[in-house]
Amino acid sequence: MSRPSEAIPAAQLGVDGAARRALGAALLAVFVGALDLTVIATILPRMVGDLGINTADIDRYVWVVNGYLLAYVVAIPIVARVSDLVGRTAAFQGSLAIFLVGSIWCAQAGDLGGLIVGRAIQGLGGGALLPVTMALVGDLLPPERRVAALGLVGAVDTLGWVLGPIWGAAIAGAAGGGESWRWVFLVNVPLTLVAAVGIARWVRGRSETAAGRGWLARLDPLGALLLTGALLLLNLGLSAGGEVNGVQGGGRALGGTRNPLAEYLAPLTVGSVVLGAVFVWWQRRAPHPVLPLGLFRSRRFSAALAANATTGAALIVAMVDVPVVVALLVEPERVSSISALMLVPFTLLMAALSLGGGAVAQRVGVRRTAAVGLVFVALGYSSLWVGLRGGAYLGLVPGLALAGAGFGLVIAPLGATVIDAAPTADRGVAAGLSLVSRLLGMTIGISTLTAIGVQRLQELVGNLEEVVPAPGESTAAFLARQSAFFEERVLPVSIQVVRETFLLAGGVALLALVPVVLMRPGRREASG
């Protein structure tokens, strides 16, 4: 994403009314796709309960989040190339159709597997919308206006996934009744159709590419498959890592089940490394590579991407773990609304400061701004660790506000550095890679930190004696004893694990300072 200070409204980009309408329709599509990146954060506990999924099996149902993220990441570089070959309108409409199918699939899902498949389909469509819109900017705008417009695209995408948790809770709350979370996916249907009509009306004829014969030969299907396979195996291995050295009790003492992939951890990890190495080898030789490796020769560019990915790994923790905490402490019917309220200071401060972070960076330098933001994130997550010590969810508010402000300050400088470090002809690709790196960090981060949390929970709970009915004990007495066991033993341990995860995420934020230091200021930056 470019400097938010340059992310000006389309009406001020110096283009005609029809082009502005075309960009508006494309931005609506990007916004809807970005919403669904995080829309389930506040409704996931309700979805888990309604579908009969065991709440102890978090390493399995975290794929409802990861499936979308992974597909979103993979779609961005692939569809960017497809749109060059078949035309923007065809690429847009195809992406919207895929997103629509995925949304309907999710709304009708009856089990965890079906929900994960639907989310992956959604992610393919949603992620595809972003690069096509970036390419559309290049088609419709003169070179001197493109970077500002890319900033607008990045700002809309960021605003979408930042507001996603609040949007999901609001739709589920308005729908009311049983399984109201399904409406979160159904509401995508009219929004997607509106975007499709707008694109068909205003994009067609203004930004078209003749596919020509043999356009499929100009794609890189092998590269796409290798990238997808490497990322999929890596995340499957990470999510199963919670079983490493785990006791036989652990989460299973809470009614959970052993991860079915636990026995394949080594093959999954080795397979991901092998496919990743083959992917890099192939990208150096492919005539039309999915990923332009030449950009990574710039240390500043690579450092900014690394910082972006590490920041994403820390960012996703709050989005996922805050609803988990709330689900432990409040009644099921209030989880979505309370989770959304808890995330308001986090998301709104992030959105506000990401839009103003460009102006701050221009005054004090991108590295200093990013470094201050990362320190704020670390302090915020440390405050979450302290605030949860008494087991009251309101103790999260100060830490969430501080962390949200920190993330907001980080997003703009990192996005600007990625674009500035790239050659002028590659800035559109660079803007896409900036977003991809953050999302990839979110994907790997949630898999890794979830595995660590599951392993820690098993260490702490595995030796607790499971509550079973005593001979001659009444049902009422057994339920009372089971409830007391949860309140006195299981709940404190679960809260402790979440607190430790927040502290670990703060450490990840501090780790991002290393690549930030390597982001030496360019000629267009006053200082670093």
Image: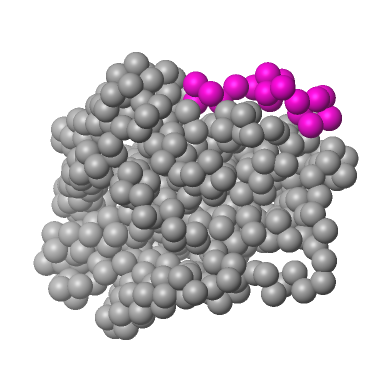
**What residue is rendered at 24% in x and 72% in y?**
243
- The answer, for residue 478, to whether it is visible in the render is no
| Residue 105 drawn at (x, y percent) | 67, 61
- 37 and 129: which is toward the camera: 129
- The answer, for residue 4, to whether it is visible in the render is yes
| Residue 471 drawn at (x, y percent) | 20, 71
Q: Quadrant of residue 404?
A: top left
Instruction: Using the image, determine if residue 523 lies above or below residue 297.
Output: above
Part of the protein shown in magenta: 4-20
| Residue 355 drawn at (x, y percent) | 47, 23
Colour mode of the rendering? one colour
**What residue is rendered at 49% in x and 59% in y?**
292
Q: Quadrant of residue 477?
A: bottom left
Left or right: where 331 falls relative to 263 = right
Left or right: where 140 falls relative to 413 = right
Left or right: where 156 falls relative to 510 = right
Instruction: Using the image, determine if residue 218 lies above or below residue 423.
Output: below
**What residue is rendered at 62% in x and 38% in y?**
31
| Residue 362 drawn at (x, y percent) | 38, 20
Q: How many marks?
A: 0
**What residue is rendered at 33% in x and 44% in y?**
300
- 110 and 320: which is toward the camera: 320
Magenta residue check for 10? yes
- 453 and 283: which is toward the camera: 283
Magenta residue check for 449? no
Please identify the quadrant where the C terminus is shown: top left
Instruction: Using the image, determine if residue 4 lies above or below residue 186.
Output: above
Left or right: where 402 falls relative to 167 = left
